[in-house]
Amino acid sequence: EPMKIDVLTLFPEMLDGVIQSSMLQRACSSGKVQIGVKDIRDFTQDKHRTVDDRPFGGGPGMVMKCEPLVAAIEATRSSEVRSRVIYMTPEGASFDQAKAETLSREEHLIFVSGHYEGIDERVREGWIDEELSIGDYVLTNGTIASAVVIDAVVRLLPGVLGNESSAEAESFSSGLLEGPQYTRPEVFQGMEVPEILKTGNHEAIREWRHQQALERTRLRRKDLLADK
Ligand code: ADE
């Protein structure tokens, strides 16, 4: 059974290029995942297709209305499998590799992308299972944030990456940053590839790479070493 992913957004065209691009495109056409994109505006009932309104109590910005959002979520929820509804917002829990792994085991993900002033709190209380942030900055809407999470999740699905081991060997699955990588030529503008990588001594190479990874992590991301 392919994993199902749906994105509910006011800007469906923002996802066109992302879903048509290499890894996600292959994952879809090889049946590992089914991605659907729905325009929240299509779930309005009024002549003007209204999706937002002024906040009660006053203040700047607009708030996304309950009715179209809830109609979109309910039309997208599956009766066959468990659907997990995720609202993308800078107020959500920080998205990371561990969360990507957890989500990759779900059957159906529904991403709700609001514009950043937010959605009516009653939708969050009644229809959202989880809120995620991709970082401490503010995007104009959550659609790009959904795309980030989808990319990180889909590449973990069994059979999606050509080389099954490459997802495990890289940064964060070990809890460390990756060390340096080199490919041909051996000398580029006078800069040489480290000797050890050309010795064919796999044990020594593994140890060298581990030391490089530790050192890079210590220099750039001391926070990742806290529990090591
Ligand atoms: N929507 C706007 N900013 C966001 C962020 N940083 N993460 C997730 N969704 C968002």
Image (cartoon, grey):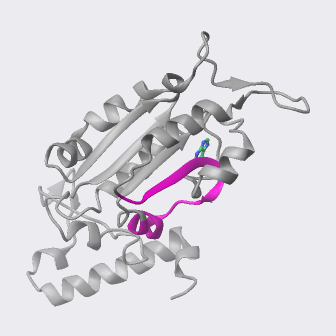
Residue 89 seen from this side = yes
Where residue 225 sits in the image (x, y, percent)?
Answer: 53, 81
Q: Report the span colored magenta.
A: 81-102
Residue 12 located left or right of residue 167: right
Q: Quadrant of residue 187?
A: bottom left
Where residue 149 sits in the image (x, y, percent)?
Answer: 44, 52
Q: Is residue 41 magenta?
A: no
Where residue 20 sits in the image (x, y, percent)?
Answer: 26, 34
Residue 141 seen from this side = no
Residue 168 located left or right of residue 149: left
**Residue reaching furthest right?**
57
* Image quarter of the N terminus: bottom left
Residue name at image x 17 percent, y 67 percent: 164
Residue name at image x 43 percent, y 28 percent: 12
Where residue 172 sits in the image (x, y, percent)?
Answer: 41, 70
Residue name at image x 16 percent, y 61 percent: 159
**If the picture is divided into quarters, which one holds ligand 1?**
top right
- Image height of 79 relative to 61, above or below: below
Q: Is residue 85 magenta?
A: yes
Residue 203 located left or right of residue 97: left
